[in-house]
Amino acid sequence: MTDEYCRVDEDRPTAEEMLERVRLTERSQSRAWLRIYLGYAPGVGKTYAMLHEGRRRKQRGTDVVVGFVETYNRPLTVEAIGDLEVIPRRKINYQGVMVEEMDVDAILARRPQVVLIDELAHTNIPGSRHEKRYQDVLQIREAGINVISTINIQHVESLKDTIERITGVRIRETVPDWVIDEADELELVDISPEALQKRMLHGNIYPLNRVDEALRHFFRRGNLAALRELALRRVLEHTDAQLHDYMRRQGIKGPWHCHETVLVAVPPTEQAQQVVRRGAHLATRLQARFVVLHVIRPSQQLDPRRSRGYQEAQKALQLACELGAQVVTQEAEDVGEAIVRFANEVNATQIVLGESTRSWLRELVRGSITRKVLGQTKDVDVHIVQRAESG
């Protein structure tokens, strides 16, 4: 049985209104912007989306050029270039072979308002201005030129090991996460795995003689579903970070419930695992981020490993890890204050607490953690999990 203390926000803006405020704020800045189209696999349509946007902007009077585009001779992609101006590639002699790379100097000299640059993770040939294309993009942006680029989820550095385990394919080129984080806009180009496999069968991604092998390996249905979920989460993380930045700049107190975060405060009691399980169930039901916090009072740390409460909390933290939670341990004398502070840091929308084991007299003297959390949080649903009856 669970008692829930829930509050309803009266004037919370919608997610669409919040994102529009973010976009308006970003557009008011004078520095050049970076927009990235993110895909979960080759063939979802990133390059086509980039070129289509470039043509739309040109029709509205923006000076747009193609800095680099890789069409792979796909008819629809070639056609999508249309009447866009294409900056000629730079030819570099590498080990007796003439290789073409993006001409950064020509783009800087041309100084368009917007440049389209495909394949952000590309590694340049030795002798180029920079080792990696994302470094070219950063220099072009620093020069005041807006950039639209593309990347697949397997090339995001922090996901490299995960994706190699999923697909069995070694990832050779990556982009640091901070480059993705600094993008003003990260847009997912998304189609269903079934539709992507149909594109493959029709020869719209790889030549027909490579289709069967691709479908048996990288383009298996399970692989594509997992990659798609990773891409969706990465875009969500980026949007969430932008909202946090906007709230901080505008001095707006959160949380905004466009994305749920369940925070579980683990008590040093036999109820610890019960509270974690209840939080995990809530996070699953809400499809929310799941965070578990354990606060240790320094004054009680003479020999915590001999404390039964400490042992119960450690079991609960291990369970939280197994259930996929982000687990954090902090030291603080005032547990209630620590929970409230951490809830603000992670933008918690749901807080799960255990039922107090203190007598009314001890709560009167030392205060109640539950009352403090209820009194110092706003726009947060606080759930109090009652202890399971024994025997």
Image (spheres, rainbow, N blue to C red):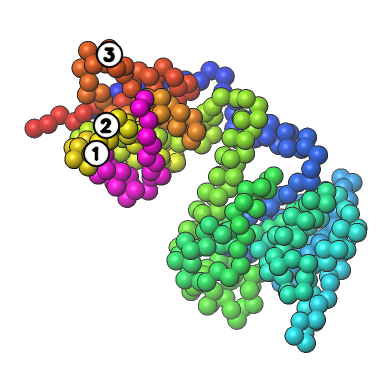
User: What residue is shown with label 2?
Assistant: 300
Are the residues flagged by discs 1 and 2 in contact, CB closer than 8 Å? yes
Q: Which dot, 3 or 1, sits closer to the camera?
A: 1
What is the CA distance from the residue labelled 3 to the residue labelled 2? Answer: 18 Å
Query: Is 125 placed above or below 345 here?
Result: below
Disc 3 versus disc 2: nearer the observer: 2
Measured as percent of width and height from the top left, residue 12 is found at: 56, 23
The residue labelled by disc 1 is 304
Q: Given the current orientation, which residue lies at the most extreme left position?
A: 391
Q: Position of residue 96 (x, y in %)?
A: 78, 87
Q: Give the mark, 3 or 1, whose residue is nearer the N terminus.
A: 1
User: Label 3 belongs to which residue?
Assistant: 365
Above/below status of 251 relative to 367: below
Q: Residues under labels 3 and 1: Cα distance? A: 24 Å
What element does badge 2 sit on?
helix
Question: Does the magenta segment cover residue 228?
Answer: no
- Relative to 369, say whether 269 is above or below: below
Q: Quadrant of the C terminus?
A: top left
Magenta stretch, residue numbers? 312-334
Going by the numbered disc 1, the residue's amino acid type is: Pro
